[in-house]
Image (tube, rainbow, N blue to C red):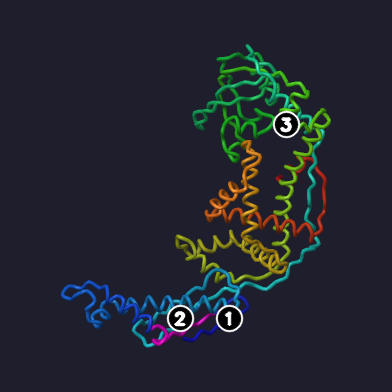
Amino acid sequence: MNITKENVDALNAVVKVDIVAEDYQDKVTKVLNDYRKTANIPGFRKGHVPMGMVKKQYGKSIMIDEVNKLLQESLNKFLVEEKLDILGNPLPRVQEDFNWDADKFSFEFELGLAPEFDVNLQPKNKVTQYNIVATDELIEKEVENIQSRYGKMSAKDEVAEETNVTGTFVNEEKEINKKSTISVKDIKGKTNLKKFVGAKVGDVLELKTKNLFEDEHKLQGALGVSHDEVHDLDIPVTFTIEEITEIEPAELDQELFDKLFADGSVKTVTELKEKIKEDAEKQFQQQADQQLLNAITENLVDNTQFDLPVEFLQKWLQTAGEKELTAEQAVEEYNKSEKGLRYQLIEGKIMKDNDIKLDYAELVDYAKGFIRAQMAQFGNMNPEEKELEDIAGRILQNQDEARRLQEQLISQKLLAFYKENMSFDTKEVSYEDFIKEVYK
């Protein structure tokens, strides 16, 4: 057997594999002997079927199977030994005159080669790193929310500006029939507010969804529609009032503080506000980090120039999935996935050049941390180590879950690397301003 590689250009190559009978004949003979021992052919005792008959019936199919096995093994070994960094998988070239009855076989495979390039971690156009701070207004609002959550609820005869109203929104055309509880304080505009104030249980209010709430997301929750549907939604709805309640805010005293922080760490309103600020900014940091990683990804893709074996990849995409694609569909799929592929190559080079690795023990520890956080939400603050190990083991047996956790951990490692090795334009903003700037 002989394997050779010919470079077409810097990004494309062809591997030729020549196979002769001596390369596969011994394996074919062994398989035929095994078949002979077990074959059930009428007129012959088991194990006494003439070899000529076995060869005639099974010889060619066994030979083809063994040649294909040898071909795959040899090609894979060659790619590893030659340390070829390929994209996609080798594509066999179709040979119109191929003949399985020939004395020797020649197979050719097209390869798409990964490009060589450098990554500049200090581009001229720097990425903005946001530092999101909790404003006094946000903290005060959260204090009010806490007082409301732990306050005393009482039924009221009619709607007032400080009450909550439970009822059912209906629009038959859009198939909306959703029972919701809303706060009258969230209603937008004097006209809408006038319809609510003074209404009683059993009243049916005729409303329009456009500009019904101060926050459009409140409308989304009230109607039970998707995020995409709620934008610019302008339809009539009826709202049948079923319950009117008012909440007397809880006192900001030690009893409330202990309900919120059982460890006794909060004793004053000032300390409560400091805790709210600390917790809020921890959550904001997660969003800021995700935005930073997204921005770095875009920046690296835009500022790292290299060519790809486009024609090869489009051809490979035609047969790479479960369903075969047409040439036009493959081009469309390539255009959609090109940016992601470019970042995968950039990410891989950064990890290789800077020895950023991920081992199984790290993945297990990461999974355990994720599980521990989930269990804490349900009140289990101190799970046993063995329980965490067992759950992590089960989760990581699921390939999709393992891949998801692995991607998250790699993202964390890369973000930490970027923060140490890139310089950014830093900007301190409120959460509202962050949302406006990033998601505009």
Task: Confirm whether the magenta stretch covers residue 21.
Answer: yes
Give the residue type at disc 1: Val
Task: Confirm whether the magenta stretch covers residue 403.
Answer: no
Count of labels shown?
A: 3
Tag shown at residue 316: none
Is residue 292 rendered to the left or right of residue 401?
right
Q: Quadrant of residue 346?
A: bottom right
Q: Earlier in the sequence, mark 3 or mark 1?
A: 1
Q: Which residue is mark 3?
A: 262
Q: Is 418 above or below relative to 237?
A: below
Magenta residues, as a range? 14-24
Judged by depth in the image, the label closer to the viewer, 2 or 3, is 3
Residue 123 percent location from the top left of the image? 79, 63
Q: Which residue is mark 2?
A: 107
Q: Secondary structure at mark 3?
A: loop
Residue 91 percent location from the top left of the image? 49, 73
Q: CA distance from mark 3 to mark 1?
A: 70 Å
Give the residue type at disc 3: Ala
Judged by depth in the image, the label closer to the viewer, 3 or 1, is 3
Q: CA distance from mark 2 to mark 1?
A: 17 Å
Mark 3 burial class by Cα count in 10 Å: few <14, some 14-19, many 20+: few
Q: Residue at x 61, y 79 (%)?
A: 9
Judged by depth in the image, the label closer to the viewer, 2 or 1, is 2
Give the residue type at disc 2: Phe
Q: Earlier in the sequence, mark 2 or mark 1?
A: 1
Is residue 3 rendered to the left or right of residue 156?
left
Q: CA distance from mark 2 to mark 3?
A: 72 Å
Q: Is 128 above or below relative to 308?
A: above
Q: Is 182 above or below relative to 328?
A: above
Residue 414 percent location from the top left of the image? 71, 59
